Amino acid sequence: MKVTYEKHEGKFFPKTNSVSFYGRDFDTMSDAVQVLKQLTPGETYFVWYYNYHMGFLHEQSGKILIEGRWLPNEDFAEKYIDTKKK
């Protein structure tokens, strides 16, 4: 079933009460809203993974949204995550 939050289009799954936006599943709509507030409706985003971390890759700029902050590119994001492990 389609769902929209402030022009972000996603899917709602009634059996589990979960939602999906930009290819990422969220347990609840509340969880999704926390992330969607940081994304611009109408832009293209892809789910981004690195070393057990998940974020969003903005198609045009190449920026990565991870842990509530935008990082300039994938290399920077990977180094940021690697640094956190130490």
Image: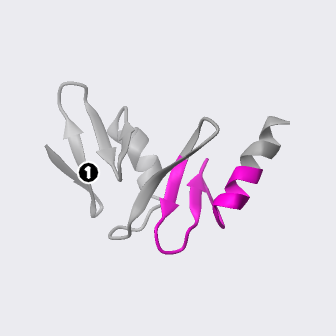
From which residue to which does the magenta span run?
A: 55-79
Give above or below for 32 relative to 69. above
Screen quadrant of the N terminus: top left
In the rendered structure, does residue 57 fall within the stretch colored magenta?
A: yes
Q: Residue furthest top?
A: 15
67 versus 57 height, above or below: above
Residue lying farthest to the right in this orientation: 86
Query: How many numbered tags mark residues here?
Result: 1
Residue 52 x/y as whole percent: 60, 35
Q: Is 74 part of what is drawn in magenta?
A: yes
Left or right, residue 84 beside residue 20: right
- Give the camera-side residue of 14 and 73: 73
**Amino acid type of the residue that numbered disc 1 sits on in the rendered structure:** Gly
Where is residue 17 drawn, in percent x and y?
A: 25, 30
Between 46 and 1, the residue placed more toward the observer is 46
**Residue at 61% in and 47% down:** 67
**Residue receiving disc 1:** 10
Residue 50 lies, in percent from the top left, at: 61, 44
Residue most extreme to the bottom? 60
Circle 1 packing at 10 Å, graded few (<14), some (14-19), many (20+), is some
Q: What residue sits 21% from the left and 40% below the top?
A: 12
Secondary structure, mark 1, is strand
Residue at left offset 58%, top offset 59%: 64
User: How was this image coloured?
Assistant: one colour
Foreground residue, 25 or 5? Answer: 25
**Residue 2, relative to residue 7: is it above or below?**
above
